[in-house]
Image (cartoon, rainbow, N blue to C red):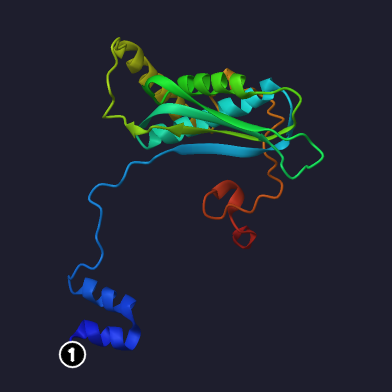
Amino acid sequence: MKAGSIMRAHFGAVLERTCNELRGISCLELEEVAPPREEIVSSRSFGSMVMTAAELGESISTYAARTGEKLRGQRFLCGAVHVFVQTNRFREKDEQYSNGITIPLEEPSADNRILACAALHGLAIIFRDGFKYKKAGIMLMDLQRNTQRQGVLFDAALDRARSVRAMAALDALNERFRRDTVHLGSAGLVRRWAMLLENRIPRYTTSWGGGLPKVFAR
C-alpha cells in the first residue's frame, strides 16, 4: 500500500494531501494570476440620525476618500461610483426609505476629488428630504489595473499626471502624520454623524497606540 493511501486509511484525506505535497506531488491548483477585484466598498452606520443633505454629503465625501485610498494602494482605477442611503428599518415608527444610484465616470480614475464629485452628484439625485437616515456608503465599480487604462477621445494626459502627483502627495502626508490630516473640504470638520466608537473592541493586532493589552503595560 502506498504511503498516501496509508495516511488516508489512518488519518483521513487531509493528511494524505499534506503528505503528498511534502513529497512534491501537487494536490491543489494554484492561480497563476489572481482574479481582479470586482468592487471596493466603504459604508458605516451613523452615530446619530442624519436628516440633511449637507451631513450626508460629508459622510459620502469621507467614504470616497477611504475607498480612493484603498484603490490607489491596490493600484486600481475605478470606472463607476455607486452611492446609496438608507433609513433604520428597525425603527418601525419612522418612515422608511432606501435608494442607490450608479454614476459612470468619463474615464477611469483613482482621484478622491473625482470619486467624491461623482458620489455627491448621485447623492443629490437620490436624496429625499424628511427622512432620518441611518446609513450611507459608496461602492467603486468597474475596477481595472492602473496599467491598463483605456484611452478616451480627448485624452488629457497632463491633467492625469497632475492628479496622480496630487493623490501621491495626499497619501504621503496622511501616512506620515495621520489619516485625514489632508482631506476634501466637502468631508467637513465636525462630523456629528460619525460612528460612535465607545464600544469598539480593543485593536490588539492593528494598533500599537490603543490596542495593546493592559497586561503588558508598565
Give the residue displayed 64% in from the left and 59% down from the top: 214
The residue where tag 1 is placed is 1
Which quarter of the image is occupied by the N terminus? bottom left
Q: Looking at the image, which residue is at 43% across and 38% down?
A: 39
Residue occupying image coordinates x 79% and y 42%:
92
Camera-nearest residue between 119 and 207: 119
Picture layout, residue 148 above or below residue 31: above
> Where's residue 83, x and y in %?
55, 29
Residue 49 quadrant:
top right
Residue 52 image position (x, y, % from top left): 72, 23
For residue 189, above or below residue 12? above
Amino acid type, residue under disc 1 in the picture: Met
Measuring 34% from the left and 82% from the top, which residue is drawn there?
12
- Up the image or down, 190 lies above or below 213; here it is above
Measuring from the top left, give residue 215's x and y in whole percent. Answer: 62, 63
Quadrant of residue 131 in the image? top right
How many numbered callouts?
1
Q: Is residue 45 visible?
A: yes
How busy is the neighbourhood of tag 1: few (under 14 within 10 Å), some, or many (20 plus)?
few
Direction from residue 172 to residue 185 in the image, left or right: right
Disc 1, SS: loop
